[in-house]
Image: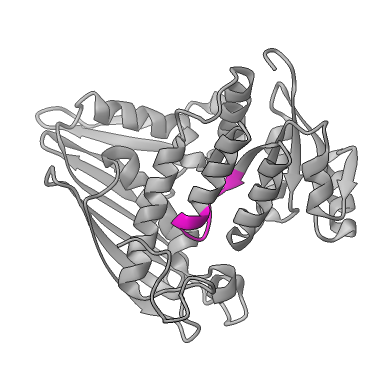
């Protein structure tokens, strides 16, 4: 595929699919050749909006389309396992929205399918592909702030969301943790890897999903991460990383920053700003560009968003849910024991 245009299929037609398609249209070396929805009229409207040649009224036709090199799965996350699995089994490469799946079991099944069929698979954790986040990670790894001691990150929406909203629908994997908390957890694990300990507390809705959750992750190194997510209160959506010799502060929108400030002991603060050439901070083009690069290089996973890292985040999310008592349909055995959540 080296040098060739990467041909994309878009599975689902919601807001995130439209945002991705808008950025993909302007990405060199990429073209959208097909879109699918369970409602043909939705697929046709999407195709007309973005100049896509083929519109399918079912997922199977897109998965079977031999002209599609890679499928972007943009369904709600409760359907990720089914949609991405269908595409992988049909021989398509897949970029799957985050959270990758509902739980670790489903994530492991998708990774196994990708390896069985020798296909590329990546979680659409756009934060990991953001140039400024990559710069921050490099500074931390180079010892700019010494040994990492603490990470703080929060992501909360004010709401209120009615009981019928998908964020409160247990059958759809609702709650703050999977939709929003995946960002603070992923940010902490980007810098520190998988934690050795997990503690958590939450306020649950009558439907049994978390309205807000606080978690403390710990590592044998002595590092701690204090993380929070909410769908009942709009937070600052900030993050900070403190080390033995300094600190990095990221202002609002830490998962797609336009700047961050490095404080080194004994030095004046240094501000690092996003390059205007990288596009708006909300751009999804960086993850699409990484998929394009990887496919052209013949890689089966991205070094920026490795599958083992995705599985590690899912293990942490499962562990948090075990501690706060959130279960999704199908996650309990007949005897009431949790079947899939990590300890």
Picture coordinates of residue 153 (x, y %)? 32, 53
Residue furthest to the bottom in view is 206
The residue under the point 66% across, 42% down is 88
In this picture, which residue range is highlighted in magenta?
Answer: 96-106
Q: Quadrant of residue 194?
A: top left
Compared with residue 205, is residue 253 higher up or lower down, i.e. above or below? above
Is residue 308 visible from the viewing direction of this image? yes
Give the camera-side residue of 89 and 310. 89
From what the image shows, is residue 120 above or below residue 208?
above
Q: Is residue 100 magenta?
A: yes
Residue in view at x 76 percent, y 39 percent: 9
> Compared with residue 303, is residue 324 higher up or lower down, i.e. above or below?
below
Residue under the image location 64 percent in, 39 percent down:
94
Left/right of residue 14 with respect to residue 316 in the rendered view: right
Residue at 57% across, 24% down:
294
Q: Magenta includes 145? A: no
Above or below: residue 174 compared with residue 91? below
Total residue callouts? 0
Closer to us: 292 or 67: 67
Q: Would residue 236 be visible to someone looking at this image? A: no
Q: Position of residue 126 (x, y in %)?
A: 52, 40
| Left or right: 289, with 254 as reference point | right
Residue 224: image x %, image y %? Answer: 19, 51
Using the rendered view, name the quadrant where residue 75 is placed. bottom right
Quadrant location of the C terminus?
A: bottom left
């Amino acid at each position: 595929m080296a040098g060739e245009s990467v041909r994309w299929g878009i599975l689902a037609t919601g807001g995130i699919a439209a945002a991705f398609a808008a950025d993909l249209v302007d990405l060199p070396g990429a073209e959208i050749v097909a879109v699918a929805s369970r409602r043909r009229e939705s697929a046709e409207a999407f195709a007309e909006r973005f100049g896509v040649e083929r519109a399918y009224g079912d997922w199977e036709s897109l998965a079977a389309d031999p002209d599609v090199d890679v499928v972007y799965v943009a369904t709600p996350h409760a359907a990720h396992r089914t949609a991405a699995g269908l595409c992988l089994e049909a021989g398509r490469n897949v970029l799957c929205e985050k959270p990758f799946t509902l739980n670790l079991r489903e994530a492991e099944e998708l990774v196994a399918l990708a390896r069985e069929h020798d296909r590329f698979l990546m979680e659409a954790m756009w934060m990991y592909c953001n140039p400024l986040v990559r710069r921050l990670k490099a500074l931390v790894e180079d010892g700019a702030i010494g040994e990492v001691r603490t990470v703080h990150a929060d992501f909360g929406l004010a709401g209120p969301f009615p009981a019928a909203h998908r964020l409160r629908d247990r059958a759809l994997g609702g709650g703050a943790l999977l939709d929003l908390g995946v960002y603070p957890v992923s940010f902490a694990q980007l810098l520190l890897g998988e934690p050795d300990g997990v503690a958590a507390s939450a306020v649950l809705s009558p439907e049994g999903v978390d309205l807000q959750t606080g978690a403390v992750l710990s590592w044998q190194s002595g590092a701690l991460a204090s993380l929070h997510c909410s769908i009942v209160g709009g937070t600052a959506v900030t993050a900070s990383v403190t080390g033995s010799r300094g600190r990095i502060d990221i202002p609002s929108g830490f998962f797609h920053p336009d700047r961050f400030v490095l404080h080194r002991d004994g030095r004046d603060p240094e501000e690092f700003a996003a390059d205007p050439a990288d596009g708006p901070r909300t751009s999804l083009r960086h993850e699409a560009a990484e998929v394009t690069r990887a496919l052209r290089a013949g890689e089966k996973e991205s070094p920026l968003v490795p599958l083992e890292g995705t599985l590690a985040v899912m293990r942490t999310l499962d562990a948090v849910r075990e501690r706060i008592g959130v279960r999704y349909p199908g996650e309990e055995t007949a005897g009431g024991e949790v079947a899939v959540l990590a300890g």
